[in-house]
Image (cartoon, rainbow, N blue to C red):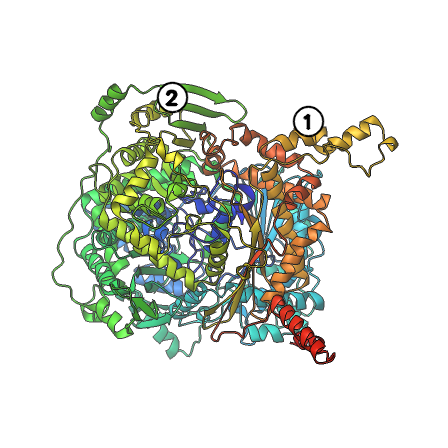
Amino acid sequence: VRGAVALGMFAASAPMAHATPMAHSTHVTARGARATTHAVAGGARPRRIAPSRSSSSSSTARALRARETRPPSAMTVRGAVGAWRRPRATIAARGVRAARRGTVRRAEEDRLGRAIGWSFLKTHAKACAFVSGRESRRMREVSARASGGDASAAGTSRWSRVLQSLATTVDPTVAEALLDEELPPHEEIRRGTLENGLKYVILPNKVPEGRFEAHLEMHVGSVDERETEQGLAHLVEHVTFLGSRKRDQWLGSGTRGNAYTDFHHTVFHIHAPTTNKDGHYMPPNVLDILYDVAFNPALLDTRVAKEKKAVLAEAQMMNTIEYRVDCQLLEHLHWDNLLGTRFPIGKLDQVEAWPAQAVRDFHARWYFPANATLYVVGDFGADVDEVEKMIETSFENAAPAEGAEEAESPLSRHAVRPPVKHAYGSPAHEAGEIQRINDEAKAQGMDDPFMPFVAPEGKVSMFQHEHLSNASFNIFSKLPIKPLKRMGDLHRTVLQRIVLLVLQSRIQSRYTETNADYKRVELDHSDSAREGCCVSTVTVTCEPREWEFALQVAVEEARRLQEFGLTSSELDRFKAAMLRDSEQLAQQAGCVPSLENLDFVMEHDACGHTVMDQVAGHEALVRMSECITLDACNGACDELLGFIGEYGVSDDKRRETSGRTTAIVACVPATMPTVEGETVPFDITPARIEAVLAADYGEITPPEDIFVPEVLISDEDIVALVEETQPTFTEATMHEPTGVYQRTLSNGIRVNYKVLDAEPGSAFLRLVIPGGRSRESSEVGPGGIGAAAVGLRTIQEAGDVGEWSRKQVELLTMQHLLVYDVEPEVEYMFMDSAFATDGGLRTILEIIHLTLTKPNWDAQALERVKDIYRMFQINTKKNIELLTHDTVNSVIYQDRRMMDPNGEALSALTLEGVREVVEKQFATGALELNIVGDIIPEEVDDLILAFMGSIKMKVDPTVAASAVPLTLKEVPANDPVRKQRLWLKDSDERACAVAAGPGPSMWAKMPSLYSEIPSFVNQEAYTTAQIEAMRDPVNEVAQAKGNPFARQSVRRANPLATYCAGMMLAEVAGGRLFTTVRDALGLTYDCNFTMSFGLQNNDATTYRLLVTSTPEKIDDALNAGVRVLRGFKMQRVSQREVDRARLTLLSRHEMDLKTNQYWTDLMQCTGTPDLAPMKKIDCIAELPLMYEACTVEDLQEVYDQLGLGEGEMFTSVTIAGQTEPKQKLTESDVAKAAAAAAHLSAALGGLNIAEAIKNLQRKA
């Protein structure tokens, strides 16, 4: 987990070892990562991190939460060495993660500041109706005839509908010329093909500096498998990657790699420094590794056997309820082809049965150079011509494998990727053409295996499972694809984006205006290279008792938008926001990481789109803006929304341009809670769902327009406040080593800010409010356990700010590309915000000012938050990993403030109670504001002085004194709660185990190795200098670099000593666990070790070992993992392990320094002496130096503080399956029985009953 090794100290958080309702990572849909391009401008988008700490946290709490809330894309199989495939941003319309949809964070994503803001960015960040170039000749013919002309040539008929909508506003001749203009391709991309057929793509990119990406895409995936080969593509990926002779030679030392398998391809990827720590120039070596992996692997029988075990363990690990939901969505969406059944993980009975020769045959059939594309993006330290020569040198000898002919290799790439046919829900004018071409082909006896056909209107398929809590309804319309090649295609994309955003905004607004029950809608219209089609989706997620109303609202609003279109103000707002977002993206053109650029190019190449850079894309959008008119947008509504607005309408009554539904998948729980709290069966049928979607809801009225203010606090009001309060800076400095400006306001608020131009036009802000859940009472009551957590989210859930309604605030934040989120931690509460710097900083400071001084408290919002917490409690009991962690939490922590409030605590909370707890923390005066980004210091000073300095603080001295320390429980060494076993009823078998115990505080002082020379040392045998070196050893490598912490006494006196050594120890432990438990023993695919560095001022630190496996192997896997951890006593950390961990952490730190949010993490709590007295601004500059200076002894010192003994460790094992497993006898049970038997045998004259019982147990 990235956070666990990079940000633990700085993104300090509560060591909750399970996902809290607000902890979510980037969401990946069932259909996986699709085009993540900017919808209207070219180029990849720099990472926009939503203000969610889950993506940048790092304590065990954060690490485990990120792990537990980041399932892999259902159909993208995890890489060969166990790292998740990097998720891409998506609006997630199709990937209903039912087990997590009931969480607060997901429930609030579309609320204050997020409904339009972040939703807009995520939706906008994807290419809308990108229609892929993977289509067959006949499909291009369909597109051409359906549009009335040659699909690749200019012509009025091609844009006739658009020109008609623009006739009253734009000169037709000018409009047609603009629409038909070709989009400008990226000028810096170099493409080529070697003589052996291998294609390559080269793109120079300077971010991150001195590093590059090399990805080899083999165009073979699970859809290429035969009926008896299901899962073989994935197994071959494992064996080839780990069977490379050169991989181990170079991976490490700053170079890392992995692989993943999908429907349509297998990708081997390596991230490397241009020159490694030993001075080796890496590009040629990395290319040699990729050559060796793909075309010269050692496909040994032993490696095949080992990786078969790994794949079987991986299948167990990923078989979560979310994965099963994803499988259902894909199965019914792609009922017409193999994508619905040929999942990359494969069929386990087949995996177990394959001989090694099956792997060799599959490799020989598909791994040939003409079936590969190499992508090289980054800072090469060479020009493009030189990189081309390196590629040729490394790959010119690549050839089909021996036995390719016998393995029936096609020796040429499929013309269509993936090689499947689709049934489309196209509008009538296109559907007729598809049907006509099918009829012609049939009459001529032609058999085109990829020829699409017209889909019948989809019916409801239902997946009902006891582990689901919320109901989700996924309405799909699968469409043919049209290449994004010309300005007219770009115009279509923009219109569709705007329509989707308006509809989502309207539906979500209606949801939040009603009762407290959870309801959410997500919309998507995008193409997918992995599926070779474009899909429109509406996903409605809600509590079971609200399902009919939730669906009705979605249908009504779709029909309203079809009937009346957008309002002029809606168009103006969304158009302006889109242009602004595009402008910001163009400003950030030189700041996009190489990996993001590579993913972008790979996806677009697969789809056949023109790849533009960000600047050219923005210029194209600006030129196109006058054609983005109200009539044009309204014309796109029918085509985009007909599949939901006209479901069930007969063909003769449908609008000509309306598409049709091709599949509906309902994923619903088996039971539901009633209003009275009883659990009853959830009575729902496909027929009832179809009836709700097709019902007549009466007359549809036009929408009302909404006034959107320019500011939330007028200039007059803020001037009056400033005159009244007379704010000043009592301290103003600039820390030279870090460039951080530090300010203290006269009301006690501290401010840290830094100018960082790595993300031009944007900034990130975090407000830290000391207190958090530690200020809650440890008892149940109106303001008791959960008051801070529930209360803070109630303010956000209410949504109103000052005199302005939630909807007004949402629309204003959209204009400034502003998103924000709040989260309560154990020791503090915080608010995060990402925004465009032009106007965005003032808006977020206005929101903070009004939230702190005039918070709006709403009883219905409180009930909504409570219900979502309750739903999360239900989810926890149904999720094997969450349940296992929660079991450990309940016995290791002293009270529930370290965990989410339970049902009893939630019921006791009142509006007045939570209000008192939260508002007292608001008024402490010890707040800290951190800002990083493309900002101007003078403007920041003016704004924080006015909007933060004018806040009147009413400090209550009893607040800090009321905090009850957070500690671990004192549990007797022999207490049975230290070893727990649970059973979770499930249709599929899985198993999970957690081991945990006490660890050192992140700020714990590290003792010197020898304050005195041990008595066993003969001092007379050493010189005075040698004796001094024993007392105070020096890291000579660090000293040679001038590192001030090379001497042990200096290093261990630094407050970062324990933290840095602990993070490096976690890296080393992770490596040993992988090598032993996963690779050598084959007991698990997933074995992670984390340290919960996060608490600033409380001693409740723990470590966690997480293992997943099969029920039969889980105990062995857990025991093996524990043995690895305990083995550090005898097999100490090696210097090589330390060097490797150091390089890994320093590389991540260096890369993350280019992001606004990471700098915010670093600065956080440097201005809160009461909360984090040990964390000073100097820590930021000293962190990399401390990593460089850490030694083997430092890591061992931290290791010695881990509670790994039998009387210190807690374990919990959960087994899921249809029947409860037989209770296993514990070692204690066996010992007691043996003792009793020994006593009995003595009484019976020596009959050895004890030995008999022991032998019996051994056999069992």
Instruction: Give the x, y percent position of residue 627.
Output: 26, 44
Cβ–Cβ under 8 Å for marks 1 and 2: no
Residue 72 appearing in the image: no
1100 or 722, which is in the foreground?
1100
Quarter of the image holding residue 1127? bottom right
251 or 1114, which is in the foreground?
1114
Element marked by disc 2? helix
Depth check, mark 1 against mark 2: the one in front is: 1
The label number, if any, that marks residue 977 in the structure image: none
Q: Residue at x 50, y 56 (%)?
A: 888
227 or 1066, which is in the foreground?
1066
Amino acid at circle 2: Glu
Quarter of the image holding residue 1011? top right
Q: Residue at x 30, y 37 (%)?
A: 919
Quarter of the image holding residue 43? top left
* Circle 2 residue: 938
